[in-house]
């Protein structure tokens, strides 16, 4: 029995990106063990691990944006993403973590791939306020100053909406859309690789 | 009140569970066909449905069709990352009572549901 209708037709760019990367997103959440954020056993150590994976992933992807700063979309959103990265790093330092990142090869091959990666990074912060609300009582105890990344600031929601609006104004042909999807998939893969490395070997950060 | 939330994303299910349990009893299900079984076996007051379910054979509209065909009296709401006016119009045309674009503010969503319930009574 197939009861599926109307999805997949007349989708805008942001919706096509979402559909095309749904499985990648799911795998990131599994490999980052994101569900543990909601478990009773979530503790300071797990929180620090979670932030470390986020930070390493952000840093790796942001390093890839440098050659594409002449693209107005990338230039516009990189500054906000740098602030997010700094917030995660600030929280890690506050927890006493020492960070060192493994140098990685460039993975994004053109500005459309980079825009796909921006989509992933901006989207990754969409649940921040909600998760921040859920975690607020516990993480406040673990920090000496107020947590910066998981704060209850809802501006990221508007930022993501603005980004999607700009995305949907782009007139993309099929190969261009494929490039953007490829960039998003590469960005998701960074999160997966960093998480796997972290849990298996802890090469990316010392705690 | 008893709520069913049909959503394939585990994190979204967890967020909804943790956030809405102060208002009502909530059951979550990731699969559209299993959701139909739950609807058959339970009397839900509210059914929240993600449109884009992972199962290639059923989406949120398929679950809604089952609800309509079986005259299930629950309030139905689409909960979706498809946030354009076109999608909102489409959801209302298909027969959803309510439409909530993601990310959902749970407290606002609950207020909207209660408001709709009062107007419907």
Image (spheres, rainbow, N blue to C red):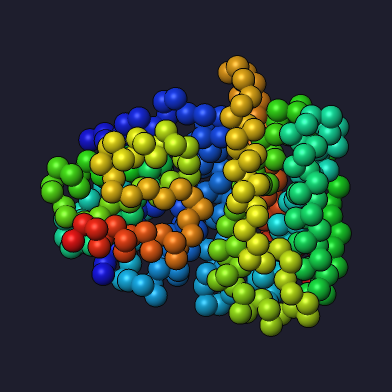
Q: What residue is rendered at 75% in x and 55% in y?
A: A84
**Picture coordinates of residue A92 (x, y %)?**
78, 68
Query: Relative to residue B35, is residue A41 drawn left or right?
Result: right
Locate the C terminus of chain A and report the quarter of the image it occupies. bottom right
- Looking at the image, the residue that sits furthest to the front is B119
Query: Relative to residue B71, is residue A87 drawn left or right?
Result: right
Quarter of the image where one finds residue A145: bottom right
Residue B85 vs residue B36, the one in the foreground:
B85
Q: What residue is rendered at 65% in x and 53% in y?
A: A156
**Res. A130 visible in picture:** yes
**Picture coordinates of residue A79 (x, y %)?**
80, 46
Residue A57 vs residue A8, the one in the foreground:
A8
**Picture coordinates of residue B91 (x, y %)?**
34, 40
- Looking at the image, the residue that sits furthest to the bottom is A141
Locate the N terminus of chain A and report the quarter of the image it occupies. top left
Residue A110 vs residue A86, the one in the foreground:
A86
Tell me if residue B79 comes above or below residue A91 in the rendering: above
Tell me if residue A133 comes above or below residue A66 in the rendering: below
Q: What residue is rendered at 35% in x and 30% in y?
A: A6
């Amino acid at each position: 029995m197939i009861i599926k209708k109307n999805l997949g037709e007349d989708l805008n760019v942001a919706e096509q990106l979402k559909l095309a990367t749904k499985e990648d997103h799911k795998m990131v959440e599994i490999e980052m063990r994101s569900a543990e954020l909601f478990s009773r056993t979530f503790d300071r150590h797990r929180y620090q691990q979670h932030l470390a994976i986020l930070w390493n992933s952000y840093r790796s992807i942001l390093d890839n944006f440098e050659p594409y700063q002449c693209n107005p979309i990338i230039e516009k959103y990189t500054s906000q993403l740098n602030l997010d990265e700094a917030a995660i790093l600030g929280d890690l330092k506050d927890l006493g973590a020492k960070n060192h990142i493994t140098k990685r090869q460039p993975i994004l091959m053109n500005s459309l791939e980079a825009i796909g990666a921006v989509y992933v990074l901006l989207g990754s912060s969409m649940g921040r306020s909600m998760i921040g609300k859920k975690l607020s009582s516990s993480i406040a105890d673990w920090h000496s100053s107020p947590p910066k990344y998981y704060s209850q600031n809802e501006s990221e929601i508007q930022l993501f909406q603005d980004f999607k609006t700009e995305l949907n104004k782009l007139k993309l042909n099929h190969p261009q859309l494929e490039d953007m999807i490829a960039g998003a998939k590469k960005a998701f893969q960074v999160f997966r690789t960093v998480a796997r490395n972290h849990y298996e070997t802890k090469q990316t950060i010392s705690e | 009140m008893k709520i069913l939330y049909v959503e394939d994303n585990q994190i979204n299910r967890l967020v909804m569970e943790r956030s809405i349990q102060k208002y009502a009893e909530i059951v979550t299900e990731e699969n559209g066909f299993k959701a139909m079984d739950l609807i058959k076996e339970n009397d839900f007051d509210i059914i929240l449905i993600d449109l884009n379910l992972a199962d290639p054979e059923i989406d949120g509209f398929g679950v809604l069709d089952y609800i309509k065909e079986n005259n299930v009296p629950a309030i139905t709401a689409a909960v979706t990352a498809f946030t354009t006016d076109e999608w909102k119009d489409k959801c209302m045309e298909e027969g959803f009572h309510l439409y909530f674009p993601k990310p959902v503010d749970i407290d606002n969503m609950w207020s909207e549901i209660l408001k709709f319930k009062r107007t419907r009574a």
